[in-house]
Image: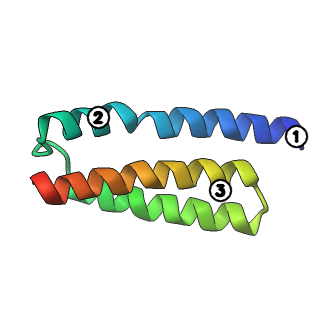
Amino acid sequence: MFNVEIIGFLAGIFTSCSLVPQTIKSWKTKSTGDISISWMLINLSGQVLWITYGLMISSISLVIMSSITLVFAVSMLFLKIKHG
């Protein structure tokens, strides 16, 4: 089971890191016009469901990494609301 969690953490790192460049760019430029609010809401909903699923199957990697991704997604949502 330990090896499965390592794969989960690696997948989560890549998924979480995928939002970092856009978050940094949006924060620096104060521009989020090309980012879809629909995409953000769907992504946020999916992350909440992944966390719930991870808790139900007791997958620490899924819960931790989805929580980190959720933080970045919420950050993007706040930037979108603030800078539209």
Closer to the camera, 80 or 50?
80
Residue 74, position as x, y percentages in the image: 36, 57
Closer to the camera, 71 or 18?
71
Residue farthest front in this picture = 28
- The image quadrant that residue 24 belongs to is top left
Marks 2,1: beta carbons within 8 A: no
User: Which element carries disc 2, helix, strand or loop?
Assistant: helix
Residue 48, position as x, y percentages in the image: 51, 65
Task: Look at the image and tell me whether residue 52 can be seen.
Answer: yes
In the visual, does 1 lie left or right of 50?
right
Name the residue: 23% across, 32% down: 25
Disc number at residue 63? Answer: 3
Name the residue: 22% across, 40% down: 27
Q: Mark 1 belongs to which amino acid?
A: Phe
Up-down: is 23 above or below 79?
above
**Mark 2 vs mark 3, CA separation in Å:** 24 Å
Quarter of the image for the N terminus: give it.
top right
- The image quadrant that residue 10 belongs to is top right
Mark 2 or 1: in front is 2
**Mark 1 vs mark 3, CA separation in Å:** 15 Å
Residue 54, position as x, y percentages in the image: 69, 60
Disc number at residue 24? Answer: 2
Residue under circle 1? 2
**Mark 2 vs mark 1, CA separation in Å:** 33 Å
Q: Mark 3 belongs to which amino acid?
A: Val
Mark 3 nearby-residue class (10 Å; few <14, some 14–19, many ≥20): many
Q: Mark 2 belongs to which amino acid?
A: Ile
Mark 2 or 3: in front is 2
Mark 1 nearby-residue class (10 Å; few <14, some 14–19, many ≥20): few
Sequence-wise, the earlier of marks 2 and 3 is 2
